[in-house]
Image (spheres, rainbow, N blue to C red):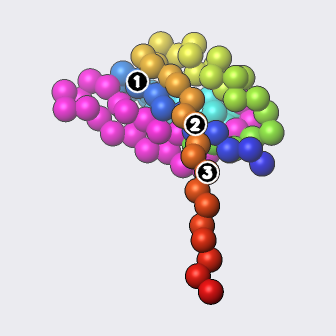
Amino acid sequence: MPQFNLHLVARNTPGCLERILNTSRVRGFEITNFSAKLDHNERYYQIDLAVSSQRSLQLLIMQLAKQYDIRELAPVKMKRTIRSAVV
C-alpha cells in the first residue's frame, strides 16, 4: 500500500490534533506515524504525519487544508534507502 508523509504547522487550539487524526482516518487513510511538537511560544504545532492508503493523497490534503487550525501543509518526498547486506 502506498505511504505518504505530510508536514503540517497548526495552531495550538483545543481539539486541533484530534481533528487532524480523525479527518485522516475518516477519509480512508491509515495513520502509520504521527509526531507533534510545540514551538517555543507554544502557539503552533510542528506535525509530521505518515499515512498509507490506496486513495489519492490529494484527497487528504484538500480536506486537511479546510481546517481553520492548519497554517501550513506540504507533502514530504520520501527518500528511498537502500540497505546493503553484509555477507
Q: Is residue 67 left or right of residue 62?
A: left
Marks 1 and 2, the one that precedes in the sequence: 1
Residue at the image position 32 percent from the left and 25 percent from the top:
44
Residue 27 rendering spot, x and y as whole percentages: 72, 30
**Residue 43: image location, x then y, percent:** 26, 24
Q: Height in image: 78 above or below 64?
A: below
Residues at marks 2 and 3, CA–CA distance in whole angstroms: 10 Å
The region drawn magenta spans: 27-49
The amino acid at mark 2 is: Lys
Which residue ends up furthest to the front in the rendered image? 87
Q: Position of residue 47 (x, y in %)?
A: 43, 35
Q: CA distance from mark 1 to mark 3?
A: 28 Å
Q: Sort mark 1 into few (<14), some (14-19) or many (20+) by Cα contacts within 10 Å.
A: many
Secondary structure type for disc 3:
loop
Specify the farthest residue to the bottom. Answer: 87
Q: Which residue is mark 3?
A: 80
Q: CA distance from mark 1 to mark 2?
A: 20 Å
Which residue in the structure is indicated by mark 1?
10
- Left or right: residue 2 versus residue 4 is right
Residue 44 visible: yes
Identify which amino acid the numbered label 3 is placed on: Arg
Tag 1, which secondary structure?
strand
Q: Is residue 30 magenta?
A: yes
Question: In the image, what residue occupies the spot 25% across and 32% down?
Answer: 39
Quarter assignment of residue 87: bottom right
Residue on which disc 2 sits: 77
